[in-house]
Amino acid sequence: MRFDLLSLQLFVAVCEEHSIAKAADREHIAASAVSKRISDLEVRLGTPLFNRSSKGLELTASAHALLHHARVLMRDIRQMEAELAGHARGTSGQVRIYASVSTIIQHLPSDLRDFLSANPAIRVVLQEGTSQQAIEAVAENAADIAIFGGAVPRAGLRIVPYRSDRLVAIMRKEHQLAGNSSVTFAEMAAFDLVGPLQGSFLDTLVLRAASDLTRPLKMPIRVNGFETVASMVEAGLGIGLVPEGCAARYVIGTGIVAVALDEPWAVRQWHVCVQKSQTLPPPVRLLLEHLTKDG
C-alpha cells in the first residue's frame, strides 16, 4: 500500500483542525482538493477516517492509528529537510516542546536562550498545555519533548528531572492572613481561593490537599496563568497560589503581598520526558541534554 506525502500532510491538518475548510486554509490549498485527497485515502485504506458531528469532523479509530504514524513520518521528513538544508552550518533541525505554563514563565526562557545561542541552526516550536497534555503529546508523537509535573500515566517514556519551584500564597494587603509569616493550606481554605486551571499540576496538588480538609473549597473562579491569578487576587476575588519567583514580580507596585506556604508540597519538582528510544534526532538529543544537564 502506497501513500503520498501530501495526502498524509493534509490528513494530519484535517485531524488537527477537525475541519476540511480550516485545513485547506492552513495548507493554502482548495478545500475540494483536500476533500478529494481524504476520500482517496479512505478508498485506499478501505475504511472511513472521519465522522461528522456538531463539533466538526471526529476521528475514527482508523484515523487515530494513521495519525500516529503520519506524524512520525512528517516529523522525520521535516527533520531530514532541515538537517540537509543546514548541513553546512552544523547541527540543524526542529524540536517541538510541549510544556506547562509554570516552566514556560520561569525556566525555559533562559534555558532556550542559551541553547539557541549555541545552536543557531536549530528551531524550537513551543506550545503551552497542562502536564497531562504535554505527556500525551510526546506519547502520540505530536511533540518531541514534554516538560511536566506530577505522576506519569504513560509507559514507554524516558523521564529526567528538570527544575523545581516553591509555591507561595498571594493575597491583598488588607487580608486577614496577610500579616502571617506563613500560612497552611487549611488556613487558606477558610477563605475564597482563586482556583488553578482544571487538570493542571497545581490543580492536582490543591485537590489532594483539599481531600484532607473537613470543609469544601470555595473557588468562585478558576483561571489559567499566574499573571491572571494575580489580577484576580488584586481585584479581591480570593487568595491565589503562584511560584515564588513569579510572586516577586506581581507584588511590586500592587496591593498584593506574598506569604510563604507551609506545606510539604509547596516545593514542586518538574521533569522532562521523551519517547524511550535510542534514535532521538540530533537536535532533540542536544536540547534534552541541555535541559537536564543539572538534573
Image (tube, rainbow, N blue to C red):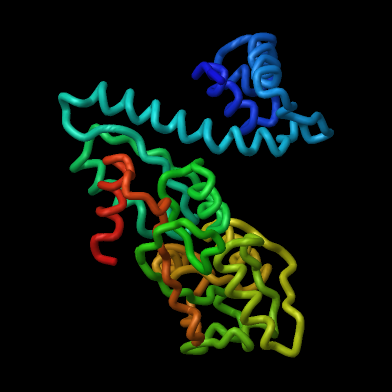
> In the image, is 31 to the left or to the right of 280?
right
| Left or right: residue 243 compared with residue 222 | left
Snapshot quadrant of residue 12: top right
Q: Residue 258, image x and y in percent?
A: 48, 76
Q: Residue at x 81, y 29 (%)?
A: 52
Q: In the image, what residue occupies the spot 50% across and 75% down? A: 257
Q: Looking at the picture, how far across and down is residue 118, in whole percent?
A: 18, 42
Q: Is residue 128 left or right of residue 118?
A: right
Image quadrant in which the N terminus is located: top right
Image position, residue 271 (x, y; %): 41, 63
Q: Position of residue 68 (x, y in %)?
A: 55, 38
Relative to residue 291, is residue 11 depicted above or below? Answer: above
Residue 245 visible in the snapshot: yes
Where's the C terminus, which quadrant?
Answer: bottom left
The residue nearer to you, when weighing 169 against 264, is: 264
Question: 93 or 39, which lies in front?
Answer: 39
Above or below, comparing residue 190 to residue 50 in the picture: below
